[in-house]
Image (cartoon, rainbow, N blue to C red):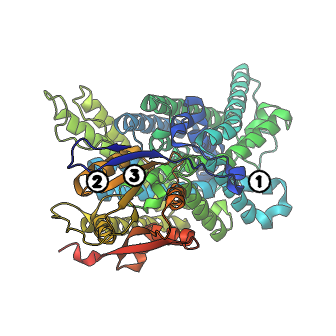
Amino acid sequence: MINSETNNQPPIIERKTQHTPKCNWRSWLIGRPLSTADASHETIGKTVGLAVFASDALSSNAYATQEIMVVLAAAGTMTFGYVFPISMAIVVLLAIVSLSYVQVIHAYPDGGGAYVVARDNLGELAGLIAASSLLADYILTVSVSVSSGIAQIVSAYPDLYEYRAPMAVAAVFLLMLINLRGVRESGAAIAVPSMSFIVIMIVMIAVGMFKYFTGDLGMVTNPPELLAHGITAFGLPFLILHAFSSGTAALTGIEAISNGTTAFKEPRSKNAATTLIWMAFILATLFVGISFLASQIHAVPSEIETVISQIGRTVFGGQGILYFAIILATTIILLLAGNTAYAGFPRLSALMAMDGFLPRQLAYRGSRLVYSRGIAALAVLSSALIVLFQASVTRLIPLYAIGVFLSFTLAQSGMALRWWKSGKLRGQKDDVGHTNTRVSKLTYDPLWRLKMITNGFGAICTAIVMLIFAVTKFQDGAYVVLILIPALVSLLWMIHIHYRNLAKNLSLDNFGIVPPHTIRHRVIMPVSGVHQGTLAALRYARMLSDDVTAVHIVIEPADAEKTRKKWETWGEGVRLVMLDSPYRLLIEPLLEYIADLAEKRQPGETITVVVPEFVSDNRLTTALHTNTANILRSQLKTQHGIVITNVPYHVHETESDH
């Protein structure tokens, strides 16, 4: 149906495709494709959100206390009295960081976490550093957590030691398949084991505390042997700081909810913030309880038996059914800890792709309404690390947590600066310079000083922890992260420069008037967007024929509306078919439309499909773009009477700066 209110406006045709994806092996593996209209039904509530995003943070309870004790063991058991005070200090830091990220969620409801906060308040470089830190940390989260879970299995079955790397890779790809099925299904799959871990740990702590207050707790029997080392008074403060930094592994994963706010049901900011508070409270309770019981039963950190195992058999009086329930739940939560990264990495990479810092393909949602390319990329990168380090937790753990504390520091610094800006708005309604629709408007907050001081203090604390990590674990492999993050920042910036230069070359600003056409021919022209490359192809199409039909596949309504408005200005009266694709398919609806025209064509009539194609003079950046022309050519070259014509638009990136 043609919609033309005036003769000057090009006709806009609304049409829906009848094509639905066929069942194939992927449908059996990850489920049937979901329509775009199903997106609201795929969001999750607070309970499932807790399972999806908290697995990493909760799993840290399995080793955070032990990491503190391993460091303190250098001075012998006499220093184990510091375990509980150090744990309380970490809980205070946890509270500060959690409150900061609650503020981040409300201020940045479209997700992005530290990346968006740092970029909005501290500049693009700070945003890229935060993003690189988070991306690296997500990859390491999967590698470390899965390798740790496999290590638990291998400790029970030593004959599997040689196969630990293939087993870990298999576990990574199993998590990938679970997450490719959609956030709601992946949440349902891990909800039971995650909640089981919380319940069994609370039971263990509750029973342990009851026995402590009744005087029946006792001490661990047959503890592993501890090799004590002397330490000078000068070294003790440094040792405590080192133990503190090691114990802050309990905070890893706390930022994931702020990155994945869009996964929650409306009101998503409120639901995400509530889930974060739940997670922080549960995490603090478990961490403090485990640390307290570990110090009371005189647990000993050891490679032979974990602290959790020692607490379990002491509290439950041996290796009974509850003890084995604890070991099983701990092993499963360690394996599932990587699921937090699968929830956060794809959303963060999609947001960065929309901003032009990662390949655009990462911003496309797959058949199950998840960012499937990001999920697959995370699986491949994590598997590469596992193979490289042979699934050794000891070799991987030094690389872990530095990046996340760098992102903590940048996020809290950015929020502190945001509150300072808020204080300057007294007497004004809001920030008159606000243009970013992804960010909530900044208004005056009477508590801006308190919030600024809180975030500033938190930034100082996390920065200190990060520096301690970098110094104490530098020789153990932390230097790899210190090299990796600058390298990632450079790569992200190079990608951004390519997209920015491309946008300049395709811009319609001050472009001028399109020359008239002279030759007739029937033409179908796919249109992904309206820019200089599109208009170059349109000029060629109108030279072939007066009968030109442009076709835009509607995948995202917001993008389609932008295309419609631009076409009304630049389309020169050529009709535009808006072909709705509820399953976000690009090629199939277009092929269906062309086949429909081919069936109704006159004898001897030829249909020419003119495809705009920009050609970059840089081969390295060619992979960042989808080559629709080649895909169409491969699909249509066997059909009679249909011609595929590429109209290249050459982009010389080196000229864009002149």
Q: Residue furthest top?
A: 214
Residue drawn at (54%, 50%) of the image: 246
Q: Residues within 10 Å of mark 3 (few under 14, many from 20)?
A: many
What x and y, as percent, mark residue 404? Answer: 47, 52
Residue 107 in the figure: left or right of residue 201: left
Question: Which disc, if any, is residue 304?
Answer: 1
Q: Nearer the viewer, residue 578 or 479?
A: 578
Q: Secondary structure at mark 2?
A: helix
Q: Residues within 10 Å of mark 2 (few under 14, many from 20)?
A: many
Question: Which disc, if any, is residue 577?
Answer: 3
Question: Which disc, if any, is residue 365?
Answer: none
Q: Are marks 3 and 1 in contact (CB under 8 Å)?
A: no
Q: Nearer the viewer, residue 566 or 228?
A: 566
Q: Residue furthest left?
A: 427
Whether residue 284 is situated above or below residue 540 in the rendered picture: above
Q: Which residue is mark 2?
A: 567
Mark closer to the chain start, 3 or 2: 2
Of circles 3 and 1, the one toward us is 3
Instruction: Quadrant for the C terminus, please.
Output: bottom left
Whether residue 430 is situated above or below residue 518 in the rendered picture: above
Q: CA distance from mark 3 to mark 1?
A: 68 Å
Residue 46 in the figure: left or right of residue 462: right
What x and y, as percent, mark residue 46? Answer: 55, 30
Please state which amino acid type lies under the numbered disc 3: Val
Mark closer to the chain start, 3 or 1: 1
Please say whether residue 400 is visible from this viewpoint. no
Q: Nearer the viewer, residue 496 or 128?
A: 496
Which quarter of the picture shows residue 379?
A: bottom right
Q: Nearer the viewer, residue 434 or 302?
A: 434
Which quarter of the picture shows residue 545?
A: bottom left
Of circles 2 and 1, the one toward us is 2
